[in-house]
Image: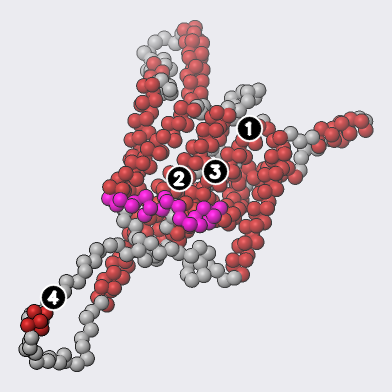
Amino acid sequence: MSFGFATASWKTCSFLAQSVAPEIADSTELTSTGETAADAVEMVEFGPAETALSILSILILLAFATSLSRWIRLLYRGQRPFGEKAFVPVRARQLPFWSVLYFVIFALALIFSSSWLQGAFQFAGWIERPAASETAELLDPKTEPLVATDPVEEPSDQAEELSDPEAEAVAESKEAPASALSVPQLTLSSLGMLSATLITLALLCIQKPRAISRIGLIPQRGDIGLGFRSALMILPPTMLIMTLVSLLQEYSHPVLDALQPAESDAGPNYAVFALLFVTTALVTPVVEEFWIRGLLQGGLQRLADWRLAMVRESFDQSSEVVEAPESEPEFEARKEPETVTEAAYMVTGPVATAAPAVLKTEPSDWTPTAIWPVFAASLVFALMHWGQGLAPIPLFFLSLGLGYLYRQTGSLIPPIIVHFVLNGLTMVMTLIEMTRA
């Protein structure tokens, strides 16, 4: 689902190259100074797409320069990822109560909700049922075993002539759905992801009423600003890694390829692009960060640190011992009441004072200790994008930065914002590319 990172880095380099070095016409084809001036005027004229391209290129260069200067400043000050001088100070919070099992529950909920919604959309006629290509292949005479007959050339030629149009029709039917993106299909994808998220959140809230806050979906003070600052620090270095990887193998994604019009004269479908922007830049960051960072990394962090938390809690309880008095208590002789008033107010027996009942709650001063859950969740995140060329390599490093933010803050808002900036930038680049085409 996170195809934005690889595409953004690849298109960034191509955009910068196109904005800096435009194509120049061959001087041998110019026969007069008038034609040379006319061609120069045509080269200077910029349309809206070229203007947006130039502005975006300048902003990207500024982002790279700012990121480099900030990294140098942080390292010069002696700051490190963890410890007292951490890049992002760690926040004290409660130990995650969910396990890695919820990661599997979300996957099952995603399969169930997508299948149910697909059936509902097909029943309503909003999307077409899958073409029966397998049935066509079975009915194709070429695939069936033929009875041994005498070799006759004419019938075989006629059979080939009859089967060629059928084969072309089947091939066209196979290629058409693969490259088509429609509004109902994108709506189905978004609703499936959101439904799985809501189902999992409902199960978490049944276990703990404050599950939404515990997992980090409620923004705290400074989370939004931290997300944008982290995007400036994380995205440029990892985009540079992707650029180096793209030199070995060019990146391509079927969703971005499907956005290109089938015919060269046809314009882009802006309705599909708008809905794809909502799905990619808004829905996908929330769903993926909740699934990978919240459920998986949070569950692994609980598995790694729960023993330490138990030891710390037992140590705190054992340290609260009753101190013995330094000397034996002195007992005074009981005084007899002299008047009726003293007899009425005098206590004739020991009075037991009950200590106020203290509700046992989970400690809220827990801080994560183990680091390996960040690497484990990043590895899973990279493997989820297997099949997109060499994109899993830089996506692993991107996920390390997102996982580090969640480990230090316990909030999903900063990783979601970084993910949003990445995918939003990719969609803007795709829109410019479609407009220029």
Q: Nearer the viewer, residue 291 or 411?
A: 411
- Relative to residue 152, is residue 216 depicted above or below? below
Q: CA distance from mark 4 to mark 3?
A: 67 Å
Q: Earlier in the sequence, mark 2 or mark 1?
A: 2
Q: Is residue 29 visible?
A: yes
Q: Residue at x 21, y 66 (%)?
A: 357
Q: Provide the residue span drawn in magenta.
A: 207-228
Q: Which of the labelled discs sits on residue 423, or is there none?
A: 3
- Mark 1: which amino acid? Met
Tell me where residue 284 appears, x and y as whole percent.
47, 42
For disc 2, the marked residue is 286
| In this rendering, position of residue 205 left or right of residue 20 | left
Tell me where residue 392 appears, x and y as whole percent.
50, 48
Q: Which of the labelled discs sits on residue 132, or is there none?
A: none
Q: Earlier in the sequence, mark 3 or mark 1?
A: 3
Q: Residue at x 51, y 39 (%)?
A: 280
- Mark 3: which amino acid? Asn
For disc 4, the marked residue is 352
Q: Residues within 10 Å of mark 3 (few under 14, many from 20)?
A: many
| In this rendering, position of residue 159 left or right of residue 309 | right
Provide the secondary structure element on which disc 2 rests.
helix
Q: Residues within 10 Å of mark 1 (few under 14, many from 20)?
A: some
Mark 4 and mark 3 in contact? Answer it, CB < 8 Å.
no
Q: Earlier in the sequence, mark 1 or mark 4?
A: 4
For disc 1, the marked residue is 434
Q: CA distance from mark 3 to mark 1?
A: 16 Å
Q: Nearer the viewer, mark 2 or mark 4?
A: 4
The quadrant holding residue 10 is: top right
